Amino acid sequence: MDHDVVVVGSVNADLVLEVPRHLHPGETLLGRDASVLPGGKGANQAVAAARLGADVAMVGAVGTDPNADVALAELRRAGVDLAAVRRVEGPTGLAVVTLADDGENSIIVIPGANSTTDVAAVEAAASTIAGAAVCVLQAEIPLDAVGRAAHLAHEAGRRVVLNVAPACRLPLDVLRLADPLVVNEHEAAILLGADPGTAVPAEQTVRELAELGVGSVVLTLGAAGVVGLDATGTWSLPARPVTPRDTTGAGDAFVGALAVGLAQGDPARDAALLATRVAAASVQRLGAQLSYPWKDDPLP
Ligand code: RIB
């Protein structure tokens, strides 16, 4: 196997704006601080996995602007193989992250170079995708490219971890390659065609997701923990009790760590236990990638 994990997805620079509270429409608000940090759901997941000691490759793209170097810095530092990250004319993906005092964030993503990670780009990276034990996918690149990557990995007999974030609808033939499908409650509701505002018991949600024909399901519930469903049945794990400073990228830390556990052959529940601890560590510091623990760091 060439790599433990390949991540096919977005690479962003995050413009993080620290504000006392979230804006109301039409309002001007004085913020406290601004920083440009490495981000992107795909790159975050790759860094999370690599910092835990996995051998990781990234498939994606950055632009020709100065943000490209910011976006690649932590991938490089964590030793991620970047041979399949293209540099394309134009801007790097940019996320504007508004972080309020309560630790909650809201994010606007301008895809930039990520929109060139299309079906052709994925096919050009086919050998990298087929050469990793676990292929990790999200939804911040064109969705037909997500589908093509899932099929390439599956045809090569590899495990597909499909994190449908941000929330979107994916075709059933793609969802059915997921083992596991990883979503939060909002993303699950969108996938199921339900109203995201309606409270549904987590066990019912994982059952309905499993009925779509996916290999297994991991439903993340934030401070309420995780519920999973696989061949062993339904299981749940509590979240680790920590005080959040910044939740940006916590879901990505979870997915990256989950992929590491699965790549080393752990059962999904054990991999999810590691992932909850890594995600808990990540919310205690500012930023996404910069907040992720390294292999020998103590975990909550
Ligand atoms: O999941 C967090 C990430 O979403 C941020 O790093 C931002 O880049 C957006 O992609």
Image (cartoon, helix red, strand yellow):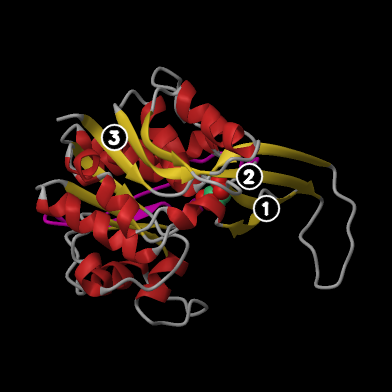
* Distance (Cα) linking label 3 and label 2: 25 Å
Residue 225 is inside the magenta segment: yes
- Residue 192 at x, y = what percent? 34, 78
Residue 34's image quarter?
A: top right
Which residue is at a point 50% across and 33% down the rendered structure image?
281
Instruction: Specify whether 97 is left or right of 10.
Output: right
* Distance (Cα) linking label 3 and label 1: 28 Å
User: Mark 2 belongs to which amino acid?
Assistant: Asp
**Marks 3, 2: nearer the viewer:** 2
Does residue 99 lie above or below 178 as drawn?
above
Residue tagged 3: 260
Establish whether ligand 1 lies closer than 8 Å to the Cβ of label 3. Answer: no
Span highlighted in magenta in the image: 223-245
Mark sitting on residue 14: 2
Does residue 10 lie above or below 219 as drawn?
above
Circle 2/circle 1 CB separation < 8 Å: yes
Q: What element does badge 3 sit on?
A: helix
**Marks 3, 1: nearer the viewer:** 1
Which residue is at a point 47% across and 62% down the rendered structure image?
166
In the rendered image, which quarter contains the N terminus? Answer: top left
User: Mark 1 belongs to which amino acid?
Assistant: Val
Which residue is nearer to you in this view: 80 or 205? 80
Q: What element does badge 2 sit on?
A: strand
Chain-order first, disc 3 or disc 2: 2
Residue extending farthest top: 296
Chain-order first, disc 3 or disc 1: 1
Is the residue marked by circle 3 packed among few (<14), some (14-19), or many (20+) residues within 10 Å?
many
